[in-house]
Amino acid sequence: MGILNIGAQALQANLVALQTTGNNIANVNTAGYSRQKVVLQTVAGQFTGGGYLGKGVSIQTIQRNFDSFLNRQSTLASTTQAADVTRANYLTQLTNIFQGGTDGVGASINDMLNAFSDVASAPTDLTARTVALTRVDETARRLRSASQSLDDLQSGIAQSIGEKVTAINTLAHNIADVNEQISRAQGNGQPPNDLLDRRDQLIRDLNQYVQTTSIPADDGTVGVFIGGSQALVLGTEVAPVSIVPDDFGDTLKSRLAITRNGSSMVLDENTLGGGEVSGLLRFQNNDLAEGRNLLGRLTMGITTAMNDQHKLGLDLDGNVGGNLFTPTTFGSSNIYQATGQTSAASMTLSIADVTQLEASDYEINFTTPPNASVKRMSDGLVRTVDLSSPVTLDGLTITTTGAAGATAGDRFLLKPYSTSASNVAREFSTPRALAVAAPLAATLTPTNTGSLALASLSAKTLATTAATVPQPSYTVTFTNGVGGTTYDIVDNTGLTAGVTGQSYVSGQAINYTPAGFPGFSMTLTGSPATNDTVTIGQNAFAATSGGNASAMMDLRDKAMFDGAALTDGYAGLISQIGIRSQSANYSAQVSSNIATNAEKDRSGVSGVNLDEEAAKLLQYQQAYQASAKMIQIAQSIFDTLIQGLSR
């Protein structure tokens, strides 16, 4: 009977081995499946006088081929890849918004400025004026279109983040359910391989959305943590995550929060690590915000400079020019208080100098009111200011009411560029209203004996309507003395005091801007003789002149965006976004290669090799057949013994 038992045990063991091999083959393409193998052990032999007699084989366990280190390494690599690839893909979309060529914003800006060349040559030509206004309208339209595209991208990101947060919560609940099943199965004494595989795959899927850390418990469950140390899953309990606004309630930025026991905690974006949600938040809160600020600064700089220059000209009817574009205004969507804050202080913004603008948001934190720190978010530069009076930083003036009554710790967020491109438009459509005429003219006295020559003349300030414009008449008189050449400016109308004893340098602008009255900027070349004079007065031929059109055209070369010319502003914008995109694409490529190699290492241990399994099928088939033959032989011997006893 011993040989029969041995054969039966061997038959059973090899049958299970065949079934396990077949299960491996069936799950070769199943995500997360770990190759299994039957672990056999020898049954303790029976002692006889001639030694220990073997009693066959038994099944010790069905083992899951699994390496926790390689699994964790592969999971971390894939979550980093998910974040990098997600960000790179969205940066590509952002790059496509700011396209170059004839259809880009840059081309429309150049076309607009060049159109004023024709107006300068023929200031009374209504066709040339109409073309210029059409170019102005096209520039405004393309700026608005780019802003709308950013808004559409923002909406798409918000929807995508919401969907992925829902997926995170679903996966977390599934992990908690499997935790419960594994905990119950622990009492069987054997590992529930399929449940363990399922849980590991759920955790890998979860890491596609947010990076996690897993810590096993004694009862077989696994705790899953995100954001460094916040428990998403503890045993069978789940703390759901959600998307909330940032500290200032800024609708253009989002944060990930986790809720446990009714208490919500906002997670630091820098602790999230990898995952698609991390990549989306980083793109939305940083890359997209910079793209919006760059577009907003471009819009604000160009439209403000054009408006200011347009106001220094006269239209065909002799009226002082107004705004060419919709002027930039700042409201509640540009200035935020920290959520829940009831500060006694309030703030307003205004433009001081468009050539100094920085494409950034600013966070203001009152330290010892009215003193506060101002952090430029684009590069982290922090400056300390006294807000009891207006403060000008980076071309913007911050005016604070009630600064002394603020509480230490009060915070404000300034977003000066977030809305400037969304509503920009051409202010008028009547070509006669285009103020391209120069309001001033300079005349060199015919009796001058020096070598003075007029290089340029432009108005600096004008009253708002023609009826209130004082008739400007200034005389500049030169004197040569021991200290060099100087000049005096006399107001011939007696409305201003003028200036005396100013140094003259050939080619250097003479600027005169009396408060409340028309001023000018004049550049002369050459050397004047003593008592040589230049008279600046109202342009008698304003209706037929295009001096202000030339001045508007000359804005092309005005240093404005980080020292670059106005017409190079859009190229600089494309360059900054392009650099970010190239860097993100490189990171995505590197992390993808790392993830691929890490997965190969993991699957090399846990994956199913069909060639290997086919060889095992033959091995276990032969062993099964041999075991069956052993039983057949034992049965034959048993029958022979029975027949012998029956005689």
Image (cartoon, grey):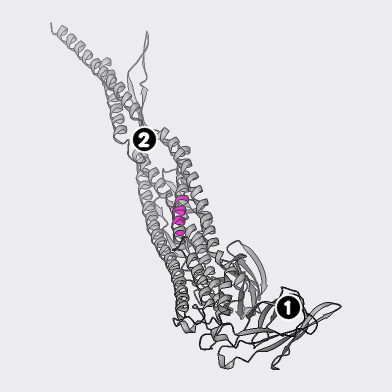
Identify the image quadrant of the C terminus: top left
Secondary structure at badge 1 equals loop
What amino acid is found at the position of numbered circle 2 in the picture?
Answer: Gln
In the image shown, does 584 or 182 lie closer to the viewer? 584
The range drawn in magenta is: 84-94
Residue 12 lies in what quarter of the image? top left
Q: Residues within 10 Å of mark 1 (few under 14, many from 20)?
A: some
Q: Tell me which secondary structure the magenta stretch mostly adopts.
A: helix
Residue marked by disc 2: 190
Residue marked by disc 1: 452
In the image shown, does 329 or 427 lie closer to the viewer? 427
How much space separates mark 2 and mark 1, taking CA atoms? 103 Å
Residue 179 is situated, as x and y percent measured from the top left of the image, at 38, 46
Residue 154 is situated, as x and y percent measured from the top left of the image, at 43, 64
What amino acid is found at the position of numbered circle 1 in the picture?
Answer: Leu
Residue 285 is situated, as x and y percent measured from the top left of the image, at 50, 61
In the image shown, does 359 or 100 lie closer to the viewer? 100
